[in-house]
Image (tube, rainbow, N blue to C red):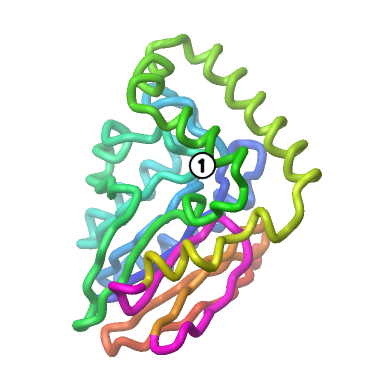
Amino acid sequence: MTYLFISDLHLSPDHPRLVRGFLALLDAYQHKNTRLYILGDWFNAWIGDDYTAPWLDEIVTALQRFTAANNQIYFQVGNRDFALGKKFLQLFNGILLPDVYSLDINQQKFRLEHGDALCTDDIAYQRFRKVIRNPVLLGLLKRTPLSFRQKLANGFRKKSSETKQLKSDDIMDVNAQAVENVISQVDFLIHGHTHRPEIHQLQNKQRIVLGDWRADSAWILEISPQNHYQLEFKQWRY
């Protein structure tokens, strides 16, 4: 069994090469008995499970083919696609994981999360996250028209881009104490969000940061059946 971890793909119809890269990944691991874990920001924005489009249909078809070959897909929401739910995942037998998930691989304990909750120095973002992820508010938003949600998502992306330019890199990275607090009970912490791929050694533990995807490249963490793990930078060639 192969374990595969990715995050921050930011798939959208505006970036077809990212979509092709994801489809190429599914093809590459189609026959490897793969457990694929997507740790948030799979899509650049997700306005609800009632959204449909031809570009998304192509992805769903590939995912159905992938899971039909005895592979499994697990998903954690990120800050861009926190509205993605079980209805969409059921189209290809995907499994929705909680915001924090514990996984045992070969007698080693892994903690999986998107990573935005660890950026505690960004106080403004943490306040926004608490409000927008409120189940009551999220339920109300899902009942609004798709057109309204699309405008809202566009506004969030624009605002996020503007505020990032005003923040220091340190504020947008994880807080060391926050990491220390959550890694104490596990052997590995795996997360994305910060777009700073690296394997950090913390005494006898490791924090593995997944990188974001680009038009011609991707960061992928693979753990083999022999417990060998590798954070790999892959380049697509079309």
Residue found 36% across the figure and 62% down from its top: 112
Q: Is residue 22 magenta?
A: no
**Image quarter in which the C terminus is found:** bottom right
Vertical relation: 34 (above or below) 101: below
Residue neighbourhood size for the residue with mark 1, other residues' Cα within 10 Å, grouped as few (<14), some (14–19), many (≥20)? many
Vertical relation: 148 (above or below) 70: above
Residue under circle 1?
79
| Foreground pick, 91 / 162 | 162
| Foreground pick, 45 / 204 | 204
Residue found 44% across the figure and 24% down from its top: 51
**Image quarter in which the N terminus is found:** bottom left
Q: Position of residue 155 (x, y in %)?
A: 66, 24
Q: Is residue 185 magenta?
A: yes
* Amino acid type, mark 1: Asn
Q: Position of residue 68 (x, y in %)?
A: 22, 54
Residue found 69% across the figure and 60% down from its top: 170
Q: Is residue 103 left or right of residue 30?
A: left
Give the secondary structure at mark 1. Answer: loop
Quarter where residue 58 is shown: top left
Vertical relation: 207 (above or below) 139: below
Residue furthest to the right in view is: 166
Vertical relation: 37 (above or below) 79: below
| Foreground pick, 185 / 233 | 185
Q: Position of residue 63 (x, y in %)?
A: 35, 49
Residue found 31% across the figure and 71% down from its top: 110
Q: Position of residue 82 (x, y in %)?
A: 43, 37
* First to last magenta residue range: 184-204
